[in-house]
Amino acid sequence: MSKYTLEKLEQDITEIINDLSALRAAKGHDYSGSADTLDNLREFGSHGVLVRIGDKFKRLKHFYQQGVLQVADEKITDTMDDLINYALYLKIMYGQETAANNKTLRCYFARAVRGVNGDAASVAEVKANIQAALQEVASLRETVSDLEIYCPHEHEDRYQQAWREGLFSSVDVLNQCLAIVRLCEVVLVASDPASSAGVAVEIEEARKYELPVLHLWCHPPEKWPDLINAYKESIH
């Protein structure tokens, strides 16, 4: 094999970047219904993009470990392309979010998904917990200003699909959530940690990195906005 020169490296990278630019343009046209090409990604912010990166990385890792893909209609090079583009989106959106409003409080919403039954929880129980979390988060977004909430329950369908395909284990899902905990400024605990091993671990992770933890679950949901606003006032 001939030497791979710096000139050749730059030439190949330029070719890849040009191909990725064409791919971004095509997908941006398909996914975004507005003049804002990132509109479809802003719903869940940069945290949502990080989840998508995690999905792609797990798929890539599974391919290198197993040598096969469960979804045959997407080539492994397509996954690589998506991973690069999502990393670019993440950097752009993180910069925009940071510059746009330094007063925005970035929160992690910790709430039981499977509860005390863990992996043995029924489908109905999981669905009920997810629905409750979505309603609680929607209410907080409506009633508390300058609040950015990452809610794992909003991505539970992706986790379940990855789990069914053998790409994620329960530990993988939790580790990905813990990585996002570390990116937040405060953890909002919406269920009793004694009823959920996952929530307990998320609280432990927050304390490990000296992140504040607000135990909302001790109070009725209608009091949660007041508790969060009081905390916001205390730090500004």
Image (cartoon, grey):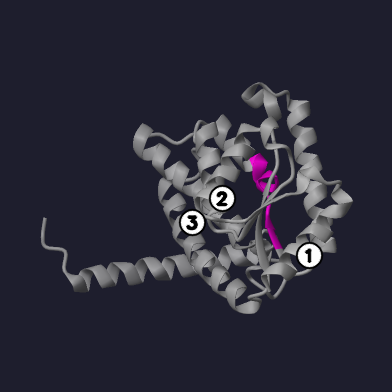
Report the residue marked by disc 3.
82
Is residue 149 toward the left or the right of residue 164 in the image?
right
Quarter occupied by the N terminus: bottom left
Q: Residues within 10 Å of mark 1 (few under 14, many from 20)?
A: some
Q: Is residue 75 left or right of residue 222?
A: left
Which secondary structure lies at badge 1?
Answer: helix
Along the line of sight, which residue is nearer the eye, 52 or 12?
52
Q: Amino acid at mark 3?
A: Asp
The one of 38 and 135 positioned closer to us in this rendering? 135
Residue at (80, 34) in percent of width and height? 128
- The answer to whether 126 appears left or right of 91 in the picture is right
> Vertical placement of 186 versus 35: above or below?
above
Residue 5 vertical position relative to residue 225 in the rendered view, above or below: below
- Disc 2 target residue: 206
Q: Which residue is mark 1?
A: 229
Q: Residue furthest right?
A: 222
Q: Residue at x 70, y 42 (%)?
A: 111
* Relative depth, front residue between 126 and 17: 126
Q: Which residues are magenta?
A: 148-157
Q: Earlier in the sequence, mark 1 or mark 2?
A: 2
Q: Position of residue 2 (x, y in %)?
A: 10, 60
In which quadrant of the rendered view does residue 235 lie?
Answer: bottom right
**Which quarter of the picture shows residue 63?**
top left
